[in-house]
Amino acid sequence: MRYLILSDIHSNKEALSAALSFMRRKRWDKVVFLGDLVGYGADPNSTMDLLRSLRPLAAVRGNHDKVCSGIENGEMFNRIALEAAMWTRRKLTPSNLRWLKQLPEGPVVVDDAFAISHGTPIDEDAYIFGEIEALNVFRQTPFELCFFGHSHFPVVFALSPDEITTILTVAPVFRLKMRPGVRYLVNPGSIGQPRDGNPLCSFAIYDSDARTIAIHRVAYPIQATQRKILAAGLPRPLADRLGVGR
Ligand SMILES: [Fe+2]
């Protein structure tokens, strides 16, 4: 089975469309989504419609999904994120609001094959930035393979009996062959707002038969997305940061 792993789409329809048209040339069987479908970007409904049309096999909610749908009030958000979330809440159709509200909290186990979470599988709002956070997650969860999002940069943490290692991926296509006896925490990166200094959208393919994980970086029309953000009256930094991937 080949799973297309998408995270942190953030209402960026151009980026999601580019990832999907790139993937049309490659085979995938099922879509899995790690949260933050909306917030920040100017296309909440059409982006949601596109993702929903893929009929994701599994999905979890992100912190922006909770605030944009009204489950939480966003008191932990900075001013810009909160402004975008309130704008999004006003724009969402009733159907999309309902769909966002029913997204479960992670972790969710998919096909008895792997787990997914937004932040960490212990706390959906917590970040995994480095090896200490990753080690704590490995120690407190049973999963051999867990995909997570929230930090918006692609990274692999691998725990062998002897050590934990970090792979910060920088190649346009990064491929990993999973090793027996090693556990993995994998962030596929962000579709809609990459923050690793590379503005290209980021996503992963997990092949459960071959036991391989690929992380792809794909270009999309960033300037079109930026123009939409400004035309919608959303804060300018949300447009600017897409150009530099931060
Ligand atoms: Fe996010």
Image (cartoon, rainbow, N blue to C red):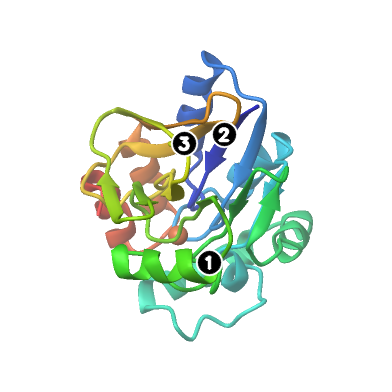
Front-most of residues 79 and 105: 105
Query: Which quadrant holds residue 47?
Result: top right
Q: Residue at x 45, y 49 (%)?
A: 184
Residue drawn at x 45%, y 73% as measured from the top left: 126
Q: CA distance from mark 2 to mark 1?
A: 21 Å
- Residue at the image position 43 percent from the left and 78 percent from the top: 77
| Location of residue 173 with respect to 41 vertically, above or below | above
Q: Secondary structure at mark 3?
A: strand
Quick one: SS at disc 1?
helix
Measured along the vertical axis of the image, is residue 182 above or below residue 91? Answer: above
Question: Element under label 2?
Answer: strand
Q: Which mark sits nearer the N-terminus, 3 or 1?
A: 1
Q: Which residue is mark 3?
A: 204
The image shows residue 161 at horizontal and vertical percentages of 38, 55
172 left or right of 40 in image:
left
Q: Which residue is mark 1?
A: 64
**Disc 3 or disc 1, which is closer to the eye?**
3
Amino acid marked by disc 1: His
* Structural crowding at the residue carrying mark 1, measured as other residues with C-alpha within 10 Å and reported as few (<14), some (14–19) or many (≥20): many
- Indicate which disc residue 4 carries: 2
Q: Is the CB of mark 1 within 8 Å of ligand 1?
A: yes
